[in-house]
Amino acid sequence: MRRSITRGLSLLTGLGLVFIGVRFLLAPRVGAEGFGVFLPSGSSYAFHYAKGIRDVFSGLLMVVFVGRGYDRALGWVMLLGTLIPSVDVAVVLAQPTATLALELPHLIAIGLCLGLGISFLTAPAAAADFSVRQPQALAGQAS
């Protein structure tokens, strides 16, 4: 049950990141405002495209890992990936327009990444995760 909930939340997180990334690629100003950064008109969108592809990649990585059942790897990706929303919230906090409403999505992402990462890494491995054969099975195949 715990594994299914953790995988489901990870899948939703990955799909959400893909959506956010695509939004940054297709509508950079809207993406930036949703992120918590407001830029003057005529600004370059180079950063937005870099952030957009980062989010698409991260989201697709999560989706593929969930689909393939790579729980341990996904746990490490989530745990180490906590760095991304941590830096993102620092960027938002540095803005003169920073408010709790703009910081909250990043803070939630930090909690989600930490919680899911720890859940994956502390869950007992499923029987299908073990690919080591028993010695008896190997001895029977030797003849």
Image: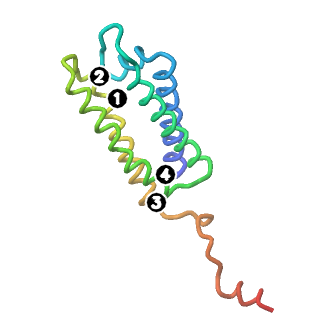
Work out how far the residue at label 3 is from the one at label 2, CA to CA, in angstroms.
Answer: 33 Å
* Neighbourhood count class around disc 1 (C-alpha, 10 Å): few under 14, some 14–19, many 20 upward: some
Quadrant that contains the C terminus? bottom right
Task: Assess whether mark 1 and mark 4 are in contact (beta carbons under 8 angstroms).
Answer: no
Mark drawn on residue 105: 1
What is the crowding at mark 3: few (fewer than 14 residues within 10 Å), some, or many (at least 20)?
some
Choose the circle earlier in sequence order: 1 or 3: 1
x, y percent for residue 105? 34, 29
Q: Which mark is residue 140?
A: none
Nearest the eye: 82 or 133: 82
- Amino acid carrying label 1: it is Pro
Q: Position of residue 31 (x, y in %)?
A: 41, 19
Residue 6's place in the image compared with 133, above or below, is: above
Q: How far apart are the alpha carbons under marks 4 and 1?
A: 21 Å
Q: Position of residue 81 (x, y in %)?
A: 39, 45
Type of amino acid under label 2 = Leu
Q: Residue at x 35, y 16 (%)?
A: 33
